[in-house]
Image (cartoon, grey):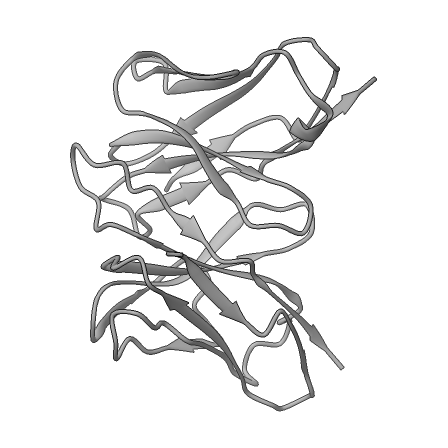
Amino acid sequence: GQSLEQPSEVTAVEGAIVQINCTYQTSGFYGLSWYQQHDGGAPTFLSYNALDGLEETGRFSSFLSRSDSYGYLLLQELQMKDSASYFCAVFSPWGNTPLVFGKGTRLSVIA
Amino acid sequence: DGGITQSPKYLFRKEGQNVTLSCEQNLNHDAMYWYRQDPGQGLRLIYYSQIVNDFQKGDIAEGYSVSREKKESFPLTVTSAQKNPTAFYLCASSDSGGRGRKNIQYFGAGTRLSVL
């Protein structure tokens, strides 16, 4: 089967840095994606890693280690609007579903 | 503007009733997906379609049905066989994906289904 593990909740202070971890077990692997979802809204794509290393997009960075089946999303200079749920998702062509989502990490940014 | 349109935003189902959720995209994407999201949970795949007139079951297809007669449209029917249909339903689309491509999924705004 396929499974992803990420923390259910994280709280961080405005202006700080927070890291959200994701470990996965899949039968086949193309890449790891991250999505953001505000309450009541639709998920939106943030980043994608197919190879080991760090990808940076503005205040957000994502890291992947294929050998460890592990990745993380790093959010810098946190803003109140970053309060949302963050989902990691594995893109795997050999499972029953092409994209498998974790259960999400709810990030609360406090003043 | 390109995007995905889901309707209605809110839907109520009576016991024994079938209801259909609409999903339309003008992104010219080959693949379309239906997900179910329960409170505090991740997204679980119901059905997906990678090409017109073809679709595959996801992890929780029981009690649901779909059709893909046009590239732009992928309606989901929640049948009376689905005993616990109350949830937030999300439709998404993407390029077909494959090695070297990201399979970025673009989501509609969702339909919130409740049982009367």
In the figure, is residue B111 to the left or right of A110? left
Residue A27 in which image quadrant:
top left
Q: Residue at x 55, y 87 (%)?
A: B18
Question: In the picture, which quadrant includes the N terminus of chain A?
Answer: top left
**Above or below: residue B29 compared with residue A77:** below
In the figure, is residue B19 to the left or right of B87? left
Q: Residue at x 41, y 18 (%)?
A: A70
Q: Position of residue B3 (x, y in %)?
A: 41, 57
**Above or below: residue B25 compared with residue A100:** below
**Above or below: residue A21 compared with residue B49:** above
Q: Residue at x 63, y 9 (%)?
A: A17
Q: Position of residue A44 (x, y in %)?
A: 49, 41
Q: Nearer the viewer, residue B15 or A3?
A: B15
Total numbered circles: 0
Question: In the picture, which quadrant includes the C terminus of chain A?
Answer: top right
Q: Residue at x 27, y 68 (%)?
A: B55
